[in-house]
Amino acid sequence: MNLPGAVSLREVGPRDGLQNEDPVPAAAKIELIDALSRTGVRRIEAVSFVHPKAIPQMADADEVWAAVAKEPGVRYSALVPNTRGARRALDNGFREIEVVVSASDTHNRRNVNRSTAESLDDIAELITLLHAEGATAEVIVSTSWGCPFEGDVPVERVVSVVDRVLADGADRIAFGDTTGMATPTRVVALVDAVREKHPDVPLLLHFHNTRGTALANVLAALQLGVTEFDASVGGLGGCPYAPGATGNLASEELVHMLEDMGVHTGVDLAALIECARLAERIAGRELPSGVLRAGPRVPQSR
């Protein structure tokens, strides 16, 4: 197989994972972020700055971020829903900031009560604000491979969103498989279509394991040369539109597979598994990670 020599993992458990769990104390979030910062992970999505009535799980974002022991060499990012959230993130010192828009109009309206087009207009203003403050703007396109309300989302629709946000100055693009509807051939179709028009734009892929295809999708993307992926420790988090289903790809499952295939991650797998155990205690439920349950295929030395 034609695989890259190394990839970059962004750990999203503290934000995307815990946002889908019952609220936990700020001290637990801080403990998890600090533990993850010592595993060798070089990117962590730490918090989101949203209205507490919308996402009560992130109501303590300012408190959490103030207490995190910022590890040298780790890039921390924050998710924001709008310019007000971006202002909070900037005031807290973040310079890597993400904003989400759904390719599916119905999903976007369910999330933020506005159309995709209306959100794109807001994102244009947000990008201008971030750049004026020396920050970067990553646009995450949710429902990139399907919508729980509309079904299939045409590739052309997703590419049109990418066209717009890049024209407005977005620095990076991420594609979210919001409820685990992607399969390898669909991953190839979307990545090829985007690269045909925008060959140099950095791409990051965020897969959910709702239907058991996350690692297969990663493998398909690797063979296209994609080297940036999101994952969540322990598989923390879930799918709000798929009750009872697993959600995020577990970070330790991703690292376990990649390292065994000779693709370097820079992450200490044993330390990451310990973080998954911590995440499980924090969540107060059994997390879906197979590597957490069974351990690596061969014993790991520390």
Image: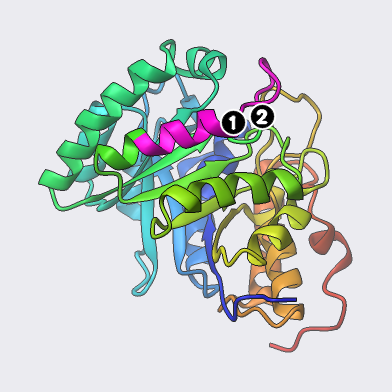
Q: Is residue 10 left or right of residue 49?
A: right
Residue 52 in percent (x, y) is at 40, 23
Give the crowd class for mark 2: few <14, some 14-19, many >=20 residues within 10 Å: many
Q: Is residue 150 magenta?
A: yes
Asked if residue 122 is positioned above or below residue 180 in the image, the reply reads above
Way the structure is coloured = rainbow
What residue do we see at 23% from left, 33% from top?
126
On residue 45, the disc is none
What residue do we see at 66% from left, 75% from top?
3
Q: Is residue 142 left or right of residue 79?
A: right
Residue 64 visible, this angle: no
Callout 1: SS: loop
On residue 146, the disc is 2
The amino acid beneath tag 1 is Thr
Q: CA distance from mark 1 to mark 2?
A: 5 Å
On residue 143, the disc is 1
What residue do we see at 71% from left, 21% from top?
151
Q: Is residue 169 left or right of residue 258?
A: left
Callout 2: SS: loop
The amino acid beneath tag 2 is Gly
Asked if residue 301 is positioned above or below residue 136 in the image, the reply reads below
Tag 1 and tag 2, C-beta contact below 8 Å: yes
Asked if residue 289 is positioned above or below residue 208 in the image, the reply reads below
Q: Please identify the quarter of the rendering in which residue 17 is found.
A: top right
Q: Which residues are magenta?
A: 147-163
